[in-house]
Amino acid sequence: MQVDTVPWILVAIGVLALMLGVVVWKRRKERRPTDYRSYFTTGIFWVASGLILSLLPWLLHGEDFNFMGSFFLIMGVGYAIVGLMNRDKWGKQVEVPPETRKKTMTILGLAALVGVLIALLFATRFLFVR
């Protein structure tokens, strides 16, 4: 039975690739300038993710560094460097109203606090289980 499903999976992958190709071909006509500020921001987030993915197994279980974390770390550094090298092309920064900024910072602060509390909960659980 599994042999019969393989051609349909390949057909589905082919159709999806064809649809993606059509979308890319259609959008190719609409050239937008590259946003190097988002390259830099993406790079910073990937560096943080790479550090977490690399160090978390070592901190929690004493295992070796994770390769996937190193991949994200290297890609993040690359994106951040490209963003910084083209800093003169960043464009104008949009001014955020103070009310929106205050609400956003409050939500991000609460989310970070919840994240730290959950991490501490899991870390202490793993420390006391052994």
Image: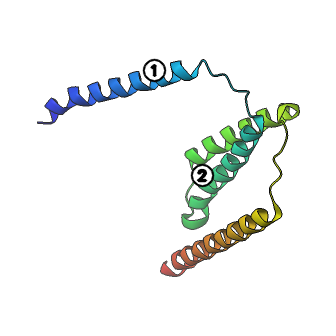
**Identity of the residue drawn at 69% across and 43% down:** 42
Amino acid type at mark 2? Phe
Residue 84 position within the rendered picture, expressed as x and y whole percent measured from the top left: 83, 37
Which quarter of the rendering shows the N terminus?
Answer: top left
Residue at 72% across, 35% down: 78
User: 118 or 52, which lies in front?
Assistant: 118
Q: For residue 46, which numbered disc appears in the image?
A: none
Give the crowd class for mark 2: few <14, some 14-19, many >=20 residues within 10 Å.
some
In the image, 10 versus 34, the foreground residue is 34
The foreground one among 68 and 23 is 23
Cα separation, mark 1 vs mark 2, equals 41 Å
Residue drawn 60% across and 60% down?
56
Q: Which residue is mark 2?
A: 65
Q: Which residue is mark 1?
A: 22
Q: Which-is-in-front pick, marks 1 and 2? A: 1
Q: Height in image: 5 above or below 31?
A: below
Q: Position of residue 73 (x, y in %)?
A: 67, 44
Depth check: 87 or 50 in front? 87
